[in-house]
Image (cartoon, grey):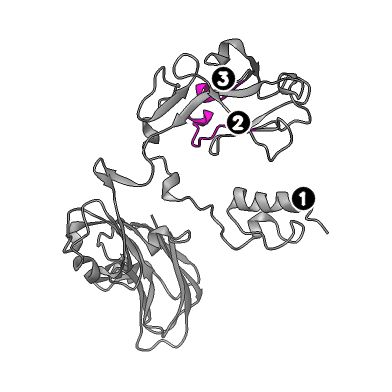
């Protein structure tokens, strides 16, 4: 049995709209309930490194970033019919990376039907509009591939089998550099290292290079940009991402503690993280001399002192610290709960630290 159109649409809906892989029908599993991430892959060769240099209005002359196809500049682009498709249905410009109107309305492609070999197709040919003539003869242009397809049920009369006309297009094409570049001298390199020691041992790393480290010193990956050639310390690197900073749920640390748990690690926070709220919810009252503080090994009650919490009452206690963690290594930014007692026999509390 053929794949239904609804199944095809569901696959595209989940892939494009939600970056998820389709694992079941839409009836059984809606797009937000799909669990497997499936991002679109973009190679570096497809990245327009000079896209910021594309003017908001199509320029009146060619440049190193934009090539304009129009009668007034270099002539409208004559296309070639795709012989593998139905007659006159699809036309290929033979070039990619056309600039879409998302960069500015004047980049909207213009389409003309005219005799082959003309240098002035815009002024002598017949313009064909994207929305058609009212006879179900619309067209669609794929700006990346440079292919025009008459997607309506009918073809415009100006390119029917009774004519010898071809299709011309007028618009702008991106001709700037592609890839991820560091400066005018060329593209920066990306290095993948097991740890920081391996980074310091590699003399080929230059300023501006991107470095992915499997273990940034705390058992977690980290991403750096080299601030100088042949970096030899963290002072020569700029930390741009860690596992915590890239995680979708990294803004909250939480745990449930018992009266006899001692020191409980809530988790690491990345450089320049500030705990905004620390909350202790006593769900079972504590007895004896039990105390709970929230902080780190350098200051065990940095975020919440014991005096802020009455563990003999079943309620919620909250504070709003102002401290900012600034160490480049997550391992030095570890937030912990310290449960201390010599006589306690019961007690349970939920702890939550929200940070930004």
Q: Count the numbered circles shown.
A: 3
Q: From the viewer's perspective, is 133 left or right of 56?
A: right
The x and y percentages for residue 34 are: 64, 60
125 vs 273, nearest the viewer? 125
Q: Nearer the viewer, mark 3 or mark 1?
A: 3
Dividing the picture into quadrants, the one containing residue 325 is: bottom left
Q: From the viewer's perspective, is 251 left or right of 118?
A: left
Q: From the viewer's perspective, is 128 left or right of 277?
A: right
Q: Residue furthest top?
A: 123
Give the quarter of the figure containing the C terminus.
Answer: bottom left
Q: Which residues are magenta?
A: 91-112
Give the quarter of the figure containing the N terminus.
Answer: bottom right
- In the displayed structure, 285 sits above or below 54; it is below
Are circles 1 and 2 on residues that touch, CB within 8 Å?
no
Taking the spot 52% from the left edge, 31% from the top edge, the residue there is 100
Identify the residue under disc 2.
80
Identify the residue under disc 3.
117
Q: Nearer the viewer, mark 3 or mark 2?
A: 3
Q: Is residue 305 visible?
A: no
82 vs 252, nearest the viewer? 82
The x and y percentages for residue 343 are: 38, 89
């Amino acid at each position: 049995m053929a794949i239904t159109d609804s199944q095809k649409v569901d696959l595209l809906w989940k892939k494009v709209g939600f970056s998820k892989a389709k694992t079941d029908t839409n009836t059984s599993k809606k797009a937000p309930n799909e669990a497997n991430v499936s991002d679109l892959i973009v190679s570096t060769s497809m990245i327009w490194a000079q896209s910021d240099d594309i003017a908001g209005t199509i320029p009146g002359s060619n440049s190193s970033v934009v090539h304009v196809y129009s009668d007034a500049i270099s002539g409208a682009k004559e296309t070639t019919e795709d012989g593998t498709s139905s007659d006159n249905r699809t036309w290929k410009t033979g070039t990619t990376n056309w600039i879409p109107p998302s960069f500015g309305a004047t980049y909207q492609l213009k389409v003309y039907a005219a005799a082959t070999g003309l240098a002035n197709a815009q002024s002598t040919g017949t313009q064909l509009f994207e929305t058609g003539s009212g006879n179900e003869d619309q067209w669609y242009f794929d700006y990346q591939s440079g292919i025009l397809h008459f997607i309506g049920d009918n073809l415009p009369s100006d390119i029917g089998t009774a004519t010898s006309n071809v299709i011309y297009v007028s618009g702008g094409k991106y001709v700037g550099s592609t890839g991820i570049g560091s400066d005018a001298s060329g593209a920066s390199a990306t290095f993948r290292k097991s740890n920081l020691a391996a980074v310091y041992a590699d003399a080929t790393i230059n300023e501006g290079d991107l470095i992915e480290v499997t273990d940034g010193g705390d058992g977690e990956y980290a991403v750096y940009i080299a601030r100088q050639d042949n970096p030899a310390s963290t002072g020569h690197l700029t930390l741009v991402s860690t596992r915590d900073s890239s995680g979708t749920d990294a803004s909250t640390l939480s745990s449930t503690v018992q009266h006899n748990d001692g020191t409980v690690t809530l988790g690491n926070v990345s450089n320049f993280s500030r705990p905004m709220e620390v909350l202790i919810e006593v769900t079972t009252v504590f007895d004896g001399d039990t105390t709970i503080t929230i902080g780190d090994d350098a200051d065990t009650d940095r975020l919440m002192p014991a005096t802020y919490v009455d563990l003999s009452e079943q309620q919620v206690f909250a504070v709003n610290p102002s401290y900012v963690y600034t160490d480049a290594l997550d391992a030095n930014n570890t937030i912990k709960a310290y449960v201390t007692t010599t006589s306690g026999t019961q007690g349970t509390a939920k702890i939550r630290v929200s940070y930004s």
